[in-house]
Image: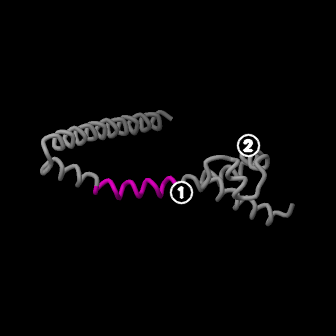
Amino acid sequence: MANGTKTQRQTKALNALINSVSLDEASAKSGVPRRTLNRWLSEDQEFVKQFRDVRRQVVEASVAKLQEASSKAVDTLVAALEEGTIGHRIRAADIILSYSMRSIEVFDVEQRLAALEQAIEEEE
């Protein structure tokens, strides 16, 4: 098979894999046999790298949307904290405190990890 044709087939397969929930569905969408998809995913390191890169881009775009929505979510929680019924205010307070504590824990772990990495680099 010519390289250009294989590249076109693999591009179709990558798009189908990203937009499908199973290999069978990706096979049907791309016209690439399931067996070929399996082989590419298990033996073709360049294809696997491209698949991971595309998947990472999709996830990063989703994370960016979540981050944009986070400020609205916080605004909603603050509004509920200030203006809601007592039940809503208590629930909003609980959520805010829970996520605040989790954030502090994550930041602490990140700082400890950075310190460990720096100590390892200094030893080398």
Magenta stretch bounds: 59-72
For mark 2, does the 10 Å Cα neighbourhood hold few (<14), some (14 to 19), or many (20 or more) residues? few
Q: Nearer the viewer, residue 120 or 29?
A: 29
Q: Nearer the viewer, residue 45 or 14?
A: 14
Specify whether 30 is left or right of 57: right
- On the image, the x and y values in percent for residue 8 come to 74, 64
Residue that appears at 53% across and 57% down: 57
Residue placed under numbered mark 1 in the picture: 57
Residue that appears at 59% across and 54% down: 53
For marks 1 and 2, the one nearer the N-term is 2
Secondary structure of residue under mark 1: helix
- On the image, the x and y values in percent for residue 96 come to 23, 42
Residue type (three-letter) at the residue carrying disc 1: Gln
Vertical order, 97 against 11 (above or below) = above
Q: Quadrant of residue 15?
A: bottom right
Residue placed under numbered mark 2 in the picture: 42
Please tell me whether residue 56 belongs to the stretch shown in magenta. no
Q: Give the dominant element type of the magenta stretch: helix, strand or loop.
A: helix
Q: Nearer the viewer, residue 116 or 101?
A: 101
Specify whether 117 is left or right of 9: left
Q: What mark, if any, has residue 66 been given in the picture?
A: none
Q: Quadrant of residue 115?
A: top left
Residue type (three-letter) at the residue carrying disc 2: Ser
- On the image, the x and y values in percent for residue 22 come to 65, 46
- On the image, the x and y values in percent for residue 32 come to 76, 55
